[in-house]
Amino acid sequence: MPVGRLCRRQLFDAYICAVIFAELINTAIEKIVDLVCIDIMQDSLGKPENNDRAMFIKDVSAGAVLVTTLMAVLVGALIFIPKIQSLFVQR
């Protein structure tokens, strides 16, 4: 396997792992925020109140996953678009 191909494959695999890792971290952050907010912020009926800070933390965490995913899409496009274009170019 040529070195360039191997590097592209490793880069692609690394970004896929980064997206999965970011999603796992996001899930952990959301569960921790839920746990803290449910224990601390409850109204008289026992329901959790809306907490703007908790929503901000969750939004930032989800934003990190979005940025990681967009970078993975960009890397995938840079790797695969030339290959797809070469299929349609007449020789």
Image (cartoon, grey):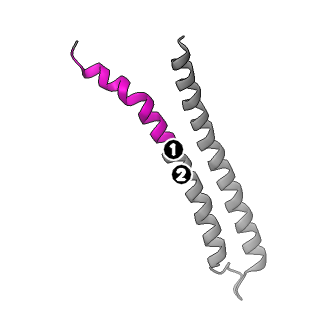
Query: For the C terminus, which image quadrant?
Result: top left
Q: Indicate left or right for 79 with 34 as reference.
A: left
Q: Magenta stretch?
A: 71-90
- Could you say which is closer to the camera, residue 57 or residue 4? 4
**Residue annotated with mark 1:** 71
Can you give x and y, in whole percent of width and height, for residue 44 in the image? 71, 89
- Residue at (71%, 55%) from the top-left corner? 28
Location of residue 2 with respect to 25 vertically, above or below: above
| Secondary structure found at label 2 | helix
Can you give x and y, in whole percent of width and height, for residue 35 in the image? 75, 67
- Could you say which is closer to the camera, residue 8 or residue 62? 8
Q: Amino acid at mark 1?
A: Met
Q: Is residue 26 magenta?
A: no
Q: Indicate left or right for 73 with 83 as reference.
A: right
The residue carrying pointer 2 sits among few (fewer than 14), some (14 to 19) or many (20 or more) residues within 10 Å by Cα, namely few
**Residue annotated with mark 2:** 67
Number of callouts: 2
- Residue at (60%, 63%) from the top-left corner? 60
